Image: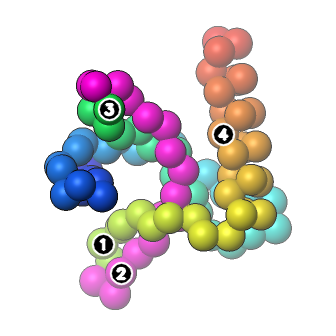
Amino acid sequence: MFDVINERKELKIGNIITVFKIPNNSREFVLFSIEGIDDNKSSLEVAYLNEDKDGNNYISEIADEGELKKAMEVVKDIIKVTNIQ
């Protein structure tokens, strides 16, 4: 669980669901949910998983549209596998 501050400076709760990689990319990505975005609904998001100089993990927005598209394809596969079981 981690804290998220949205653009209106409201505190939300986030949960990392899984960490994954995409082909031909050394970075790690996370699929996470944020609770209570709008009207107490949850939202699924993807982001980079980073590590600061002290070894603490944090997430950041995926700015590259190509990487975001590839990451979302992996998420689509994760959801398919989850729904089969």
Where is residue 49? Give x, y as percent.
48, 64
Q: Quadrant of residue 68?
A: bottom right
Q: Is residue 29 left or right of residue 52?
A: right
Q: Is residue 75 left or right of residue 61?
A: right
The magenta region covers 39-54
Q: Amino acid at mark 4?
A: Val
Distance in Å between CA atoms under marks 1 and 4 = 24 Å
How many neighbours does mark 2 have within 10 angstroms: few (below 14), some (14-19), or many (20 or more)?
Answer: few
Q: Earlier in the sequence, mark 4 or mark 2?
A: 2
Q: Are marks 3 and 2 in contact (CB under 8 Å)?
A: no
Q: Earlier in the sequence, mark 3 or mark 1?
A: 3
Residue at (74, 33) in percent of width and height: 77
The residue singled out by tag 4 in the image is 75
Query: Which element carries disc 1, helix, strand or loop?
Result: loop
The residue singled out by tag 1 in the image is 56
Q: Are marks 1 and 2 in contact (CB under 8 Å)?
A: yes
Where 76 sits versus 19, above or below?
Answer: above
Main secondary structure type of the part rendered in magenta: strand
